[in-house]
Every structure is written in C-alpha cells, then in structure tokens.
Amino acid sequence: MRFVEHLPHETRREDHVTITMSDGVRLSARIWRPTTSDTDPVPAVVECIPYRKNDLTSTRDAIHHPYIAGHGYACVRVDLRGTGESEGVLLDEYLDQEQRDAESVLAWVAAQPWCDGSTGMMGISWGAFAALQTAARQPESLKAIVIASFTDNRYADDMHYLGGAMLSDNLAEAGTMFAYATCPPDPEVVGERWRDMWRERLEAARPWVLEWLRHPHRDAYWRHASLNEDYARLRCPVLASSGWADGYSNAVTRLLANVDVPRRGLIGPWSHKLPHLGEPGPAIGYLQEVVKWWDHWLKGVDNGVMDGPMLRTWMQESVPPSTSYEERPGRWVAEPSWPSPQIKEVEHPLRGSVIVTTDDEEPAPRARTRTVRSPLSVGQFAGKWASYNAPPDLPYDQREEDGGSLVFETEPLAERLEILGSPSVDLEVSASAPVAQITARISDVAPDGSATRVTYGVLNLTHRESDEHPQPLEPGRRCHVRVPLNGVAQAFPPGHRVRLSLSTSYWPLVWPAPEPVLLTVHEDGGALTLPVRPTEEPDGMPQADFGEPEGCRPPPVTRLTEPEQAWNVSRSLVDYHSALDVVKDRGTQRYEENGIEVGLRACERYTSVADDFSSLTGRSAWTMRFSRPGWDVRVETSTVLTSNADAFTVDATLDGYEDGRRVFSRTWNETVPRDLA
C-alpha cells in the first residue's frame, strides 16, 4: 500500500465526541474532518461498528477515514451502544435499537454546523450490515452507501445457517461477540465511570448462540433487517463489494439483480477484507473508488462514476490447492448488467460417475442408484466459512474429502471453461432418516490429480421446499432437491477436469445432522448446472484502471509479544478421536497514541470420535486484556456446544479480572431442542 502524505484538505481529529440517543444513552464517536469545515460545511460519512475505535480498529480506521476526510468529508466512526466508550449494553446483532441509534446518529451529524446536511454510510461486515439496514429505513439525510462483505438475507447468507444447516461459525461468531460485548471502556476517556459501565456490560452478557439456536428456521427473527423481504426499501445508490474467498460473495450479485437504484458491484479474490487491504491479492485502489463515489453522490460531481459496467470481478485462474495464497492469478472481467445477458446456464446430466459435457443425444435414463454415508472426517480440510486469511483457512486438497463422497467428473476438458455466477445441482434422492443434509462441492482437478475446491453448497434436506416451513423426509421416499452453490468466477484450463462431490456431512464447517444417514442418489434427473461465460467475450477492465492501493499512514503500534496462528487437524488411530484446533493470537501490542496495551487470544476446537454423532463438540474461548500503568483488566470467555439426536447443549463461562483478581463470574448451562436441525 502507498501511504499518502498530502491530501487536498488539511484535517483535524476529535477522539471522543458523544452523541445522545433518544433514551439518554450516549454513543462515542471519533471524527475526522477538514479544518475548513468550521466555515465551509462538508458532507459526512458514518461508520457504526462494535469493534473499539480507541484500540482494536484504530489502525484500520486511520488508513481510510482520514484519507476520505482529506478529500473533503467529515468521517464519523461510532462505537455501537455497549462497546468501546459508548454507554449501554450490546445484546445481539442488528436489533431494532441499533438501527434507531444509527438514524439518530445520522440526524445528529446532518445537523452539525460542519456538515452540509448530506450523509453517507460505509463499512465492512457489521458496518456494511448497519449501512444497508439503516438505508432501508430511508433516513432523510442519507444519500448513498458503500458496503463490503454483507448480506441482504440474514438467514440464508450470514455465518449462522447455510441451506438450513447450522454452520460452526454460529458458535465461533457467538464466541467472538461474547468477548467483544464484555470488554471495558477506557478510563482515560470516560473517567471513573468505567468500572460501572463495564459491570453493566458483564451483568447483561449472555451467549448469543443460545438465541441463534432457538431460531433454526427462517422466521421473524431473521426476516428482521433482511433487505430481501422488500428490496424496494432501498432507495439510495449503493457501491457493493466482496471477495470470492469470503462467505458473503453471493449478496453482491443478488443485490445488483434485485434493487432498482444506481448500483455498482465489485468482487475480487479476497477473503473477509476491504479491497485496498485485500488478501489474497491483488489488492486495489479501493479508496480512490470510494472517494469518487462520494464525490458524485454527496457532492454532485459529474465524474462518470456510473459509466461502464455494473459488475467488475476477478476471474480466477487455476491454482494448486493451498490453505493460503498471497496472490490469486487471474484478470478483471466486466459485466454490463446483472444478470448478465452473456452468461449461459448450461445443464450437464450426471450419468454413473460422469458429468456429461458433450452435445451428443443422451440415452434414456436408467434405474441406477448410488449411495453415500460420509464419515465425519469429511470436512476437516474444508477451511473456514468466511476466510480471514489468518491463520491460513482456505480449503486444502479435496482428495481425502472425496474418499468419503460420491464423485462425478468430466473427461479432461478439450477447451478452456470459464464460469461466473452460482452453479446448482439437481438430484433425485432418498434418505434413511427424516433429517439429512447434503454438501455439494465443485473442484478443479489438475492432471496430477490434485483437487482445488472452487465452490460448494449445503442443503438441509428438510428445507428442500422452504426455509420457513421445513418438513421431515419420509425415509426411503424419493424427492427432488436443488442444491445451490456459492457464486464464483473461475477458469478451468484445457486438460483439467471438473469434479462434483456429494457428501452427507462436512464437519466441522457444518454441524452434522442428528444421526448418520445413508443417502441414495438416483441417476435419472441428476444434473449439474454451470453459469458459463464465453471466453471470447471482451473483458475491458485491466487491473491498471483501479490504481495502486493507497491510504493514510496509521499511527505507531509497538509489538510487545509475538502473535501465534495455528490450524491443526489431528486424528488418533487408537481411540479414533479427531480434532481441529484453531488459534488466533494477536500477541500483545501497545497503541502509542494513547498508551493502551492490548492482548487478544482466541482458540476454537472441534472434536468428534469415529462416526459417533453424539460425540460432536465445539468450543470457542477468548481472552482479551487491556492495560496501561495503574489499570489492568482481562475478560475470559468460553462457550462449549454439544449435541445429541434431540437437543443442543451450551455450557458457557464469563470471567472478568481487574489487577489479576477475579471480580465477576457467571456460568450458563442450557439446552435447546433440535427442530429438524
């Protein structure tokens, strides 16, 4: 990244500005704005997230907010209620209270003498959710949004459920927020009130996974704040982005297809990162694109921001399997609209173990069946639902996974094949139990046999007709199912094969069904549909058009202890115990601007024994420590999730320490019945 030292506007920063909500709770904001805005008001850009502006996101914030401010905007970075130095408590994701708070923040910002009355919202992940959900409420001052790594459908495309099957990230994200929602404010900012504010957060805390387990179907809980309930609610322009290695890639194209506002989409090869910090690379000059967007929609500059294609995306080239890539080879391609008129849905019948790719007339279907009952070991090389690229968390070589799966494969390709969009698999199946799931994976198989997963999809078969009203299977009875796979842009070279793999489990990425299931796949009616992009179409978007990634230089941070990263798969052939251990330890670092020393360590562990479905255990444990001379506070959380055929059980602990002495402790031991999950 190129750090920009001189920008068009000189700026000033205010570190703790309080904004009072309608119920009297005061939120804390950090504001960057041009010094001239005292007499010459400017538009404002707001970001609302729960991740602590005073320390944990301060480096990231300092790269892009002063950069945007230096181009003539007031940037307002707000800690959500109950986080950082904001008062109150944070009780769950995306509550109505949060959106009301955002509306109050926008109204306050628009009324400030340094703001000209026009606002925008931006963010990645939670910040993008906040921007999209607030925009759907149509606040008067909000003129445009910029969002990355988001979803318009909280049930189908967040980190909780996928195809009606529960993701292990349902536990992992709950563990993350269990820790973040119980961290203390900074005494140097809020004064002696810090201990009372911290105590209030600790007293209000609970493992959010309990609430998420109580809503295994798409009910009112998930419909709330899901834009796809009524796309017409979005009335302002949107610049939307994500990455193919992220868990949120589907929402960009879905948004482009369904909203009727000025819109642009951008999908790179990235994990859960902003595009100017994109990993795997190439990262791009995203902030230049963002400033151009704001200039047009907030300042009325006629800069051609809406000229050109609706969607720009990175067409990924074939790569060997790896859990991490510094760069993904490929090229930028462009689509004038979405759905694209040049992409053709091509259906390939499944015959025996073959994906049929020729145009020859197909013989009449035969009454042929194949069965699969996957071991729980299938999925240990699946990687993370949403890659963060640290520790390395992309899927590894799928050959071991394929040993416990049904496999269909093309002949070696005679010509290059490019796909762009969401593949799907149609199947006629019957199952041995009333609750079953299927995972479908597409891999790029090289001539040496190595298999790189390209995309995948999951379906809880009780959700075959509806996420709102799932129905149990009748054991042994045939039914038709369609399994949608995540969107992707991928090239398959000549000589490579396209492989489709079907498994009945994908643990620990997906929490398995209540019991082992024998799935029968009937040959007639089986087909793989690929969204084929003609290779002769002009691309028209060279990488140089984006420019080099740039931003402002962040303030100094001193590393005091080294970070640790691990992603270890282990198996015992004595007692058949298997485990995946993930360690994300930032080490301890000191933020030199305010002297806060912060340590963060997160550990996840997923275990099972042989194919005993009652042995499944997931654990998320966090330690977060904040200190400076005279102040030393630590929060430790642990959430353990187990299950049997009838219920999930959550055992959780929360401990707060001040100066090494435990000052708060609470435990939870609760059971949630399974409901076709």
Image: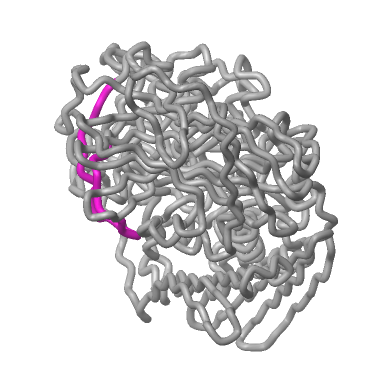
639 horizontally vs 312: left or right? right
Task: Residue at 79% x, 66% y: name it.
Answer: 649
Question: Residue 92: image x %, image y %?
Answer: 71, 50
Q: Is 557 situated above or below 397?
A: below
Task: Residue at 43% x, 70% y: name it.
Answer: 567
Residue 293 visible: yes
Query: Dominant secondary structure of the magenta stretch?
Result: loop
Observer-nearest of 481 and 643: 481
Q: Is 444 situated above or below 336?
A: below
Task: Residue at 61% x, 86% y: name it.
Answer: 659
In the picture, residue 607 is in which quadrant? bottom right
537 horizontally vs 164: left or right? left
Observer-nearest of 217 and 533: 533
How is this picture coloured?
one colour
Question: Residue 117: image x %, image y %?
Answer: 50, 22
Question: Residue 165: image x %, image y %?
Answer: 66, 47
Q: Is 33 situated above or below 601?
A: above
Question: Residue 51: image x %, image y %?
Answer: 53, 55
665 horizontally vs 65: left or right? right
Observer-nearest of 69 and 361: 361
Query: Which region is colored magenta?
Result: 316-334
Task: Residue at 80% x, 36% y: name it.
Answer: 471
In the picture, residue 670 is in which quadrant? bottom right
Q: How many circles with numbers are drawn on the protein?
A: 0
